[in-house]
Image (spheres, coloured by chain):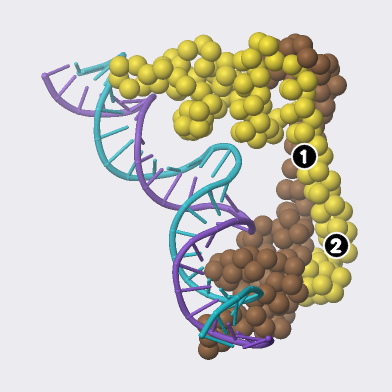
Chain colours: A yellow, B brown, C cyan, D purple
Amino acid sequence: MNIGEVAEQSGLPAKTIRYYEEIGLVRPARGENGYRAFAAVDVHKLVFLARARSLGFTIEDCRALLALYEDRGRASADVKRVAQEHLGSIERKVAELQAMHATLSDLVTRCHGDDRPDCPILEDLAGRG
Amino acid sequence: MNIGEVAEQSGLPAKTIRYYEEIGLVRPARGENGYRAFAAVDVHKLVFLARARSLGFTIEDCRALLALYEDRGRASADVKRVAQEHLGSIERKVAELQAMHATLSDLVTRCHGDDRPDCPILEDLAGRG
DNA sequence: GTAGGCCTTCCCATTACTGGAAGGTCAAGC
DNA sequence: GCTTGACCTTCCAGTAATGGGAAGGCCTAC
């Protein structure tokens, strides 16, 4: 299977698939013409990667998860640990964003948003908030 | 004032201050020895930038906000618009993260996390969820 | 004069791609 | 057989916003 079809099936851009090969996440065979020849197992891996990335796992997380996926003797505890750490980082990011949002939406509410220059947003940024 | 002291006062690393100069956010004078010589106005700008960055504004947003900050004839509506767009992007990010969190925390709950290989997390990633 | 703590510039690395140039391959149509 | 266009290839460069570190100049204290 050529890269274009794999891209379609996995939902990943061809560029990204090439990148994943470059960093060793997949190792498709090559045809005589030099084209990548993807086997079913490669496509499965790419689908797996696409899904893991869409859940926000980093590439290195994906590498670890893929290794566990392929290890028939894995312990589910190892998978769970990776997922829980990622959940924690999501929670930290959400908290950070919500703090920003709270501050900023308060400032926005207090800004008249007219043609005059006085602005509580700028005043806050300037340290006079 | 030398960069070290400015770093301390603004809370920005010296590296970052040099970067901000490189991209034209600040333009400190230079002493005869080649050292950057920061005036009070430069420090104010850096404090402003540090605060804006901490609220998640991009560098380009910061550039725009700084220009408005320095424009005594600005309309507060212009400031408010930048802030509102940023609020929107924060909201989109939070929503995305929360969707990831919902999916992932469900999977984590369903994973036994023991020494056996069966794992709903991997099954989901593999597309059999 | 020398030790150390500043300062300078410069280049490389990060994350996870994305865009684009230059060129090889393949299948269809004439 | 030739052209056209859609594929495919590699390689280089850029993104956002820094961080790390090397090599070297400057400044103050002892």
Q: In this view, does D5 lie to the left or right of B17?
A: left
First reached walking from the N terminus: tag 2 or tag 1: 1
Up/down of B20 relative to A67, above or below? below
Query: Circle 2 sits on which residue?
Result: A107
Whether residues under marks 2 and 1 lie with C-beta atoms below 8 angstroms apart, the answer is no
Q: Which chain carries label 1?
A: A
Identify the image quadrant of residue C23.
top left
Q: Residue at x 77, y 39 (%)?
A: A89
Q: Which amino acid does label 2 sit on?
A: Leu
Q: Position of residue A27 (x, y in %)?
A: 47, 21
Q: How many marks?
A: 2
Alpha carbon distance from label 2 to label 1:
27 Å
SS type, badge 1: helix
Type of the residue with mark 1: Ser
Query: Considering the image in quadrants, where does the C terminus of chain B appear?
Result: top right
Judge by depth and name the residue closer to the eye, B58 or A71: A71
Q: Position of residue A37 (x, y in %)?
A: 41, 17
User: In the rendered view, does A4 fall on the left or right side of B97?
Assistant: left
**Quarter of the N terminus of chain B within the rendering:** bottom right
- Can residue B99 be seen? no
| Chain for numbered disc 2 | A
Helix, strand or loop status at disc 2: helix
Q: Is residue B84 above or below residue B71?
A: above
Q: Which mark is residue A12?
A: none
Q: Dot 2, crowdedness within 10 Å: few (<14), some or many (≥20)?
A: many
Q: Report which quarter residue A70 is drawn in.
A: top right
A115 shown above or below A98: below
> Which residue is pictured at 76% across the width and 59% down the height?
B54
Residue at the disc numbered 1: A89
Q: Which residue is drawn at 36% across and 21% down?
A: A35
In terms of image quadrants, where is residue A1? top left
As displayed, is residue B113 above or below residue B11? above
